[in-house]
Image (tube, coloured by chain):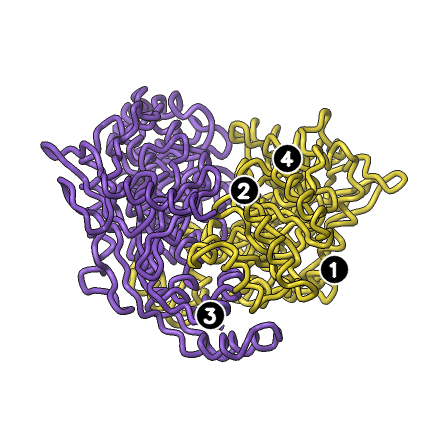
Chain colours: A yellow, B purple
Amino acid sequence: MTWPEETALLTDLYQLTMTEAYLEEGMWDEAVFSLFARKLPPRRNYLLAAGLDDALRYLEKLRFGTEALDWLASRGRFSDRLLGWLERFRFSGDVDAVAEGTPVFAEEPLLEVRAPLPEAQLVETYLLNQVHFQTTVASKAARVVTAAAGRHVMDFGLRRYHGTDAGLKVARAAYVAGVDSTSNVLAGKTYGIPLAGTMAHSYVQSHDDELEAFRAFVRVHPNATLLVDTYDTLRGVQHVIRLARELGEDFQVRSIRLDSGDLLALSKAAREMLDEAGLEQVRVYASGGLDEDAVAKLVARGAPIDSFGVGTAMGVSSDAPAVDMAYKLVAYAGRPRVKLSSGKLLLPGAKQIYRREVDGVARGDVLTCRQDTAPGRPLLQPVMRGGQRLPEASPTLEAIREFARSELSRLPPEIRALSPAKPPYPVALGQALLRAREHEVELWSAAT
Amino acid sequence: MTWPEETALLTDLYQLTMTEAYLEEGMWDEAVFSLFARKLPPRRNYLLAAGLDDALRYLEKLRFGTEALDWLASRGRFSDRLLGWLERFRFSGDVDAVAEGTPVFAEEPLLEVRAPLPEAQLVETYLLNQVHFQTTVASKAARVVTAAAGRHVMDFGLRRYHGTDAGLKVARAAYVAGVDSTSNVLAGKTYGIPLAGTMAHSYVQSHDDELEAFRAFVRVHPNATLLVDTYDTLRGVQHVIRLARELGEDFQVRSIRLDSGDLLALSKAAREMLDEAGLEQVRVYASGGLDEDAVAKLVARGAPIDSFGVGTAMGVSSDAPAVDMAYKLVAYAGRPRVKLSSGKLLLPGAKQIYRREVDGVARGDVLTCRQDTAPGRPLLQPVMRGGQRLPEASPTLEAIREFARSELSRLPPEIRALSPAKPPYPVALGQALLRAREHEVELWSAAT
């Protein structure tokens, strides 16, 4: 099986068993589900929304093919009614969403799905899987980009991301957040993200000595980035300088890469040695277990590093590898729905987010009932109607990245900063929403 | 493109540029690369090896198809020599590996690849991507299984794992580590893992009241697991008891699920209420942000929970979402290779791991040069020769799981425990390996 047939089964068993029950009960009324973060991780002042493009593609393409249906039938546990319905399945609903690249906060829907209950239920797992992960990584990557303060950032971590899909989606989400390039060749092909690459220690090790390795590599790749820390970083820099003397005007090496040790001291020493040798044009790359804190520290201390290769910590979102994000029923058959589970109180009904900006800086959001209004810019916009993606909901990746840059630049500086903002960004609840929640809670308390 | 064609480009750019240089230089000699963890995360006493099956499948199937080659050619940066070589690429090398389900420690190779340098280099990214991730998750899941102390554990977290491939591979790695079932339907189809599922809050919310929701669900799924915490957990339990009275002998509900609140107090109260109502056969499931520490605490305090639904924390390996694992050149053209980068000193040459057991308990490992011997059982075994997987290297998933169970049971109790073991499990370096490292370091120090 290939996507999307295989993807149809990438769901939780209970989506199928609940759908089966909905079909038996004839529960075809319209449901509204809201996808949002219940709270932000301790070191996140905002989340950067990402993953909508994959969510909409899934809703447009989702089909249950013969192989999937045959396998389900062979389980002997699913009714013919369910199997027949799955065979005919086409998502027919509506989606409203914040644009990818929008900063969002706790309780604010990243997207809302409005569809007959069985359809809206069935798609939960995949929508959350993609939006949760891409948003988690975009939010982490935005911090790395902030820390780099305008210096280049390269995504180098495919080898330690969580599987193949993560490898692709990290490259995409990080690019949305402002990362400049990726080492992932398939991400270059799939998304048109600029590719970056240097050389590995194995290349140097496989040659008889480091200088010979550098000579050999630039014969094939004259404007290479040479990795200098295989044996001794500053001797590596000396070998680069010696190579420059050997090659004279043919020396086109673009940069060196430091990958271990005290990157502040080594980058300063390397820069000085290169400058003294008249190699001011050779740039200094740094990598090796970097996260936003390490990058910020290097930048603050004036490390002469032009480009940061960031990998594992960014793409697994090391300090917050998951966000408490959920996809919750907020209305069914025209009535708002709540959930009172301890610590997980739900806001009922379809919603809208209004963002108020003064002099180009976001001052606060108001979360309202969908039909309500508030001052500011409404962030949830129609992106799919009747199962069809709207033409305006297919921005290019470059447009998404530029939008994210612009949106992030409007956040107050303390919200963009790496440290926890005190107070956090203000999100108020609209009066009608507060009343709706109170009303539903009272109804349930009376009923039970 | 579909797998494996698409997967061919799921690599770092530098694998292609280095390969290009190797081809130009005629560097066809045999290389040995070793895949190992440089160190263990603070809260891991061992790693549980996983991911070998995907690694071997990749090596057997890897081909560069027309679409990939055309796209690479269109970049205008790759030589015809490289493109021609990629077109003809078949992995022709040998692999030795520890069996999936083997506990391993820092510096111990999970696998070693022996092949002409360009082949062994090119496959680095995918091998690490799969072995690193599956090992990371299997190691976390083994802790959850230990904490559960024989009670059932279900993988419930697909929605918050890192993409689609992670969803599948978590289910697999967790099953290897002893988790009993998964909610992931595709993992059930792909790997034959038992499926588990309950119901979501949305099902309860979409009905007019909770009892009506329970009634409706068991009409379709008589032996369901009913989720009782949507409004008030103990009232939810009362509704289950009332349903039992209504249905009499037709009541076949298998279990209830608690998903929020004080799971210790609620499970005790729920168990008591069920028992008083004569419903001793109804089991109690618990879920909701559980990790191994929460599970261990519940078990230690005697929570009457029969089955734990564990998700996000397990599948993103929340406290250690990555391991410092690498794929390093240790020999080329018959000569051991080292790397002296600060903090990343490499052990030269192909290796073997000997595990010494006394009375069925592992007492310590010796890491040796491949040809060297030591007392105990050698863990690295041939799994691929000349690009062909050996027949004995295709165990069933059930066999891998049983092997893991047996291997884990032979670890000393303090190593299997959740707390950091002091001292850690002993791994000694063989004399010949120590001498080889000294020798290489001296050679390089003299040369540079």
Pointer 1 residue: A399
Q: Residue A313 has which mark?
A: 2
Chain name for mark 3: B
Residue at image position (61%, 77%) is B74
The mark closer to the camera, 2 or 3, is: 3
| Residue most extreme to the left | B359
Residues under numbered marks 2 and 4 in contact, where contact means CB atoms less than 8 Å apart: no
Determine the residue located farthest toward the right in the rendered image: A359
Whichever of labels 4 and 1 marks the residue nearer the N terminus, that label is: 4
Q: Which residue is drawn at 38% across and 23% down?
A: B264
The answer to the question of whether label 4 and label 3 lie on touching residues, with beta carbons closer than 8 A, is no
**Residue type pointed to by label 1:** Ala
Q: How far apart are marks 1 and 3 (CA)?
A: 42 Å
Query: x, y (%) of residue B21?
Result: 50, 67
Mark 3: amino acid: Glu
Q: In this view, does B236 lie to the left or right of A28?
A: left
> Which residue does the numbered mark 4 point to in the structure image?
A44
Give the secondary structure at mark 3: helix
Bin the neighbour count of mark 2 within 10 Å (Cα to Cα): few under 14, some 14-19, many 20 and up.
many
Q: How far apart are marks 4 and 3 (CA)?
A: 49 Å
Same-chain status of marks 4 and 1: yes
